[in-house]
Image (cartoon, rainbow, N blue to C red):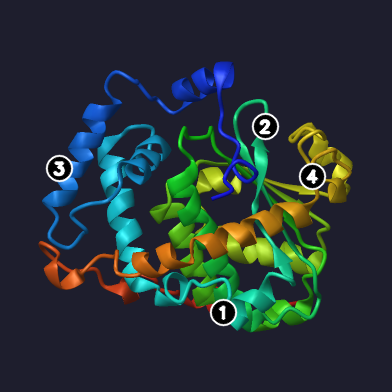
Amino acid sequence: MASAATLIQPEGEMWKKIRVELNEDINTRDRDLEAIKDWLRKQPHLPDEWDDCRLMTFLRGCSFSLEKCKRKLDMYFTMRAACPEFFTNRNINRPELAALVTKAQGAPLPGLTPNGRRVTICRGLDKNIDPEQLNNIFKIALMIGDVRLKEELEGVAGDIYVLDASVVTPAHLAKISPSSIKKFLICVQEAYPIKLKQVHILNTSPVIETLINFIKPFLKDKIKNRIFVHSDVSTLYEYIPKDMLPEEYGGNGCSLDEVNDAWMKKFDDYTTWFKEQESIKANEALRLGKPTNYDELFGIDGSFRQLSID
């Protein structure tokens, strides 16, 4: 698989700094990994075996806190069962997914910032993108997440997301499903070992400000304080070096089209793997104690439905 062009791994001094940031002690990490594997085998509702590489990605994302790692893993497998709309039929050649990749892009850039962070730029390419496709957009985003669980072999010092809102219209907002957004945000914040450092929003508009205010109640406080809105791309360079940004954003890196083409090929290579993974999920009937109530997990309060669009 062509991973070299898609996820360049940290090395040298950057690698050493990331170890410190992730609280990773190379002398004790194998013991921590064994402890997590032992715990997993004792949970009747979770898979007995999972590969070391992905478990290590979870440990790193949880700064080697075993308790936090157990909670995240439990939530990860729970969400895989609770959200079949995100975690099944993940074949990039299916017509509904193949059509979408020409209308939206959101793969991570191959390199890392000087402090070891992975940057992902998400943008729509087509104003006519159908909001009904939101679940499939989220599906592709979580496919990227699952490939990264496997391929981030050394761990990174967090993630930076750049959201280009230029094609979002009030008509999109009127049709967006609040429950899909809420499920996706629970997945990203509770089930994946992401250290979200910054979110940058470009090409904002009143409709985007409405959307941000709409989403904020479902974000953790520390994430709310990491959202930056830019009226001009030049202020983005204060956070992400121009050398790393793609040419579409005034940078010297490869084009976003190249980045996304490499990921489409990777998804194609992973087709069989994605199919095999569909059975890897929590079985609530076997959970010790009270099974997870999905309605409670995704409870949508009244204020979430009352979205006013100016």
The alpha-carbon separation of the residues under discs 4 and 1 comes to: 27 Å
Amino acid type of the residue tagged 4 in the rendering:
Cys
Asked if the residue at tag 2 contacts the one at tag 3, i.e. Cβ–Cβ closer than 8 Å, the answer is no
Up-down: is 154 above or below 196? above
N-terminal-most mark, 4 or 1? 1
Q: Label 1, secondary structure: give it.
A: loop
Q: Which mark's residue is nearer the viewer, 4 or 3?
A: 4
* Most foreground residue, 256 or 287: 256
292 horizontally vs 104: left or right: left
| Residue 260 figure quarter | bottom right
Disc marking residue 113? 2
Amino acid type of the residue tagged 1 in the rendering:
Arg
Q: Which mark's residue is nearer the viewer, 3 or 1?
A: 1
Q: Which residue is mark 3?
A: 38
Q: Which mark's residue is nearer the viewer, 4 or 2?
A: 4
Disc marking residue 94? 1
